[in-house]
Image (cartoon, rainbow, N blue to C red):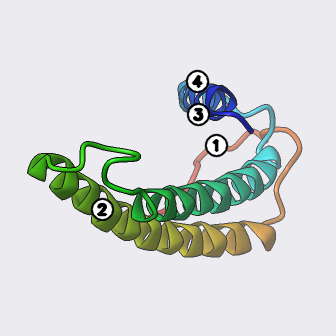
Amino acid sequence: MSAGDTVGASKRLRQDARQLADVITRLDSPSSSYSLLGDLLDAQRSIEQALRELAEWHRRTIPGVHFAEHHDESAAGVTTVVEQLDLAGQQAEGLHETLSRAYGGSSVVRWFDEEQESADPPTLP
């Protein structure tokens, strides 16, 4: 994948995530929430991988080749990027584990394909 393809993929991810966030409250059917969670789980794993790979790319950068060699702020900036992407990767792993538990919880629910009428809907925590 070329650099342009990488940036394009990143922009498409951003747009698709924004679109999903805008429509998430309007599920086609209650049962589709399980599939949606599965898709989010897979997407989160890919985001985690991208964060870790981006950290590794920054870790392998070479002063004078990828950034200004005798510019202290550049070296410090790269160090900060690596540290923060490592942290983001760890946090993304935690989010993936949390989503996995949500997906597992949803797997045992007997979802309806269509919403049912209820005189007194219960309130869940």
- Dot 4 corresponds to which residue? 15
The residue beneath circle 1 is: 119
The disc, 2 or 4, on the residue closer to the chain's N-terminal end is 4
Q: How many angstroms separate mark 3 from mark 4 (CA)?
A: 9 Å
Q: Amino acid at mark 2?
A: Gln
The residue at the point 76 percent across, 45 percent down is 30
The earlier-in-sequence mark between 3 and 4 is 3
What amino acid type should be assigned to the residue bearing mark 4? Gln
| Residue in view at x 65 percent, y 62 percent | 45
Q: Is residue 13 above or below residue 53?
A: above
Pick whichever of labels 3 and 2 is earlier in the sequence: 3
Dot 1 falls on a residue whose secondary structure is loop
The location of residue 120, given as percent across then percent down, is 58, 48
The mark lying in front, picked from 2 and 4, is 2
Q: Are marks 3 and 4 in contact (CB under 8 Å)?
A: no
State the image coordinates of residue 72 (x, y, percent, origin top left): 10, 52
Residue at mark 4 to residue at mark 1: CA–CA distance? 39 Å
- The residue under label 3 is 10
**Label 3 residue SS:** helix
Give the spatial CA distance, label 1 vs label 3: 46 Å
Question: Would you name the residue on which mark 2 appears?
Answer: 84
Amino acid type assigned to the residue bearing label 1 in the image = Ala
Residue 19 image point, x, y percent: 60, 24
Q: Residues within 10 Å of mark 3 (few under 14, many from 20)?
A: few
Residue 3 vertical position relative to residue 59 in the rendered view, above or below = above
